[in-house]
Image: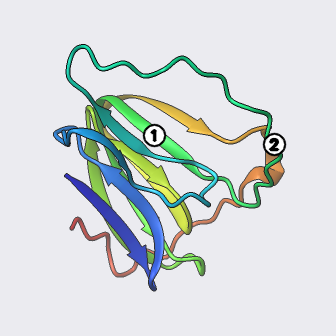
Amino acid sequence: MNEEIRIQGRLCAVILRADFDEPGIQFFTPDDYSQQLASMSYPPGKVIPAHTHNPVHREVFHTQETLFIRKGKVRVDFFAEDRQYFTSRILGAGDVILLISGGHGFEVLEELNMIEVKQGPFAGDGDKTRFVPDLTDGLRYD
């Protein structure tokens, strides 16, 4: 199963649940995204030809990150570009999320181990803007 989180019509995140298992290669992102997310599922004997990747100049204007939840549970809170709370999702072991746009925050619900993959090089303090969300409406767990 996979889910797209859209805020005001804009794709904010793609969640790929641990139980997703479709045959072949399934891309969840368009070609122009700076992070590409795909699932690959093949039977024994499938050969993926050896290859290298060519140097290609790319410009990245917004950091996108992919999180692989290895163990535990985490709540992901999603925010619009204006920092207004939108919705939340709970991820568990085996789930993967690609964070594309908007804001996000996390609360660890069970001891967590996750792997993060994002573009580099890291820009230090210039890489992100932290904010304190207005949660007067409370968090929603859809």
Residue 102 point in image, percent of width and height = 55, 69
- Residue underneath mark 1: 67
Q: Residue at x 56, y 46 (%)?
A: 65
Circles 2 and 1, Cβ within 8 Å, touching? The answer is no
Tag 2's secondary structure?
helix
- Residue underneath mark 2: 124
Q: Along the polypeptide, which appears first: circle 2 or circle 1?
A: 1
Residue 78 point in image, percent of width and height = 43, 66
Vertical arrangement, residue 103 with respect to residue 72, above or below: below
Q: Residue at x 45, y 46 (%)?
A: 37
- Is residue 66 visible in the rendered structure shown here? yes
Residues 59 and 140: in front is 59
Q: Residue at x 25, y 14 (%)?
A: 45
Q: Quadrant of residue 128?
A: bottom right
Tag 1's secondary structure?
strand
Residue 71 point in image, percent of width and height = 29, 26
